[in-house]
Image (cartoon, coloured by chain):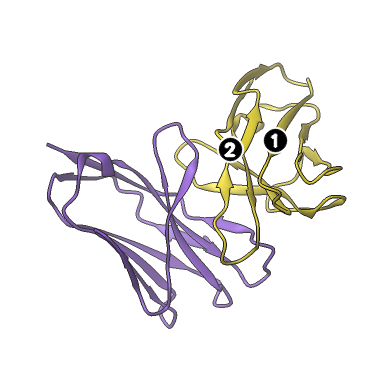
Chain colours: A yellow, B purple
Amino acid sequence: NAGVTQTPKFRILKIGQSMTLQCTQDMNHNYMYWYRQDPGMGLKLIYYSVGAGITDKGEVPNGYNVSRSTTEDFPLRLELAAPSQTSVYFCASTYGTDYNEQFFGPGTRLTVL
Amino acid sequence: RKEVEQDPGPFNVPEGATVAFNCTYSNSASQSFFWYRQDCRKEPKLLMSVYSSGNEDGRFTAQLNRASQYISLLIRDSKLSDSATYLCVVIGGTSYGKLTFGQGTILTVHP
């Protein structure tokens, strides 16, 4: 199993550009999450999904959108990139909910200039 | 007040030392507690879950005090490979597995 994979690994955007961060998991997990991590800080939840077709906002959803058309894929869309969105983005998935380990992808490092 | 607070450190200890990290959480309805480890420029990985009765995994011991809303991690006989950031993580009462992270405690173990 590849686990959770993310693409791209790095990206530089100009202010106002848009992009999609890809996330795929091959563990048949229903629950998937997007987090961002700013320098020296813990992770913050952007959006999450409890299954295909079901998504909801986390703590910091502004400026982002998600979709979940399949169990495997959970892309994160950035519209009109801003410098405040410079961060490392982690996708995660888990089989169950509260007591189960979340498995994280390797992250996407995004810089908005 | 932050939902999960940790002393960011950094902690610099010699090999073989014992080091303890503390964490407090604000949501009394929180139901699940974890310590994750994050190496430099890598993704977080689960180190251990924290149970009410306390639990141990080799050199690592985790404790939970629900009354004080306090979580701890003790590392005995520190190794160079223990150098990392340790993240205190809580799942609040709203479920769906949404993790709330502390800012992390940086540990450096030196020879």
Q: Which mark is residue A105?
A: 2
Q: Quadrant of the C terminus of chain A?
A: top right
Chain letter of the residue carrying label 2: A
Chain letter of the residue carrying label 1: A
Q: What is the CA distance from the residue labelled 2 to the residue labelled 1? A: 8 Å
Could you say where residue A109 lies in the image, as x and y percent from the top left?
58, 26
Give the total number of marks visible in the rendering: 2
Whether A99 is drawn above or below A35: the answer is: below
Name the residue at 60% across, 68% down: B92
Q: Please, which residue is most extreme toward the bottom here?
A: B67
Q: Which element type, helix, strand or loop, lies under badge 2? A: loop
**Which quadrant of the figure has residue A73?**
top right
B30, A95: nearer the viewer: A95
Badge 2 amino acid = Gly
Could you say where residue B28 lies in the image, as x and y percent from the top left?
54, 77
Whether B78 is drawn above or below A82: the answer is: below
Could you say where residue A51 lies in the image, as x and y percent from the top left?
80, 54
Query: How many neighbours does mark 1 have within 10 angstroms: few (below 14), some (14-19), or many (20 or more)?
Result: many
Could you say where residue A74 lies in the image, as x and y percent from the top left?
76, 40
